[in-house]
Amino acid sequence: VRNVFIVCNADTVLIDVMNLFKNRKVKVSLHAGPVHKKGNSVDGPTVEIIKAMSDYATPSSINASEQVAALLALHPTVFSVGYSGFFKHADNDHSIFKIEWR
């Protein structure tokens, strides 16, 4: 399994990034937070949460954390946002939301 991390800083950029994956059979997991750059890679708590969240994704699905789901919900004509459940990571509960294109 190969993980691709795309760092973006605004909802309009996020929508552009999501367009890259539209109608493709990939798992997309979205979360927002600081990352630590190490050479050509990134790590830190945000990356660890994304990795953990991707275990719950299925091909052609888009999962988002609460932070990103709230941002995407501001675009109701573009996205449908629905609660999917939660997972534990580092002794904390993290909500997962299913994102669908309208």
Image (tube, rainbow, N blue to C red):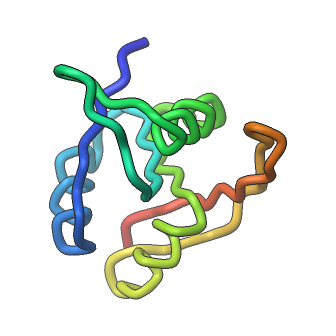
At horizontal 26% and vertical 33% (from top left) the residue drawn is 37
| Depth order, front residue of 57/71 | 71
Residue 87 percent coordinates (x, y): 77, 44
At horizontal 22% and vertical 56% (from top left) the residue drawn is 8
| Depth order, front residue of 33/8 | 33
Residue 50 horizontal side relative to residue 84, left or right: left
- Dividing the picture into quarters, in which one does residue 13 lie? bottom left
At horizontal 27% and vertical 73% (from top left) the residue drawn is 11
| Depth order, front residue of 74/49 | 49
Single out the residue that lies furthest toward the top: 1
Single out the residue that lies furthest toward the right: 91
The number of discs equals 0
Question: Can you say whether 63 is above or below 83 in the image?
Answer: above
Quarter of the figure that contains the C terminus:
bottom left
Quarter of the figure that contains the N terminus:
top left
Residue 60 percent coordinates (x, y): 43, 39
Question: Can you say whether 60 is above or below 15 in the image?
Answer: above
At horizontal 69% and vertical 66% (from top left) the residue drawn is 83
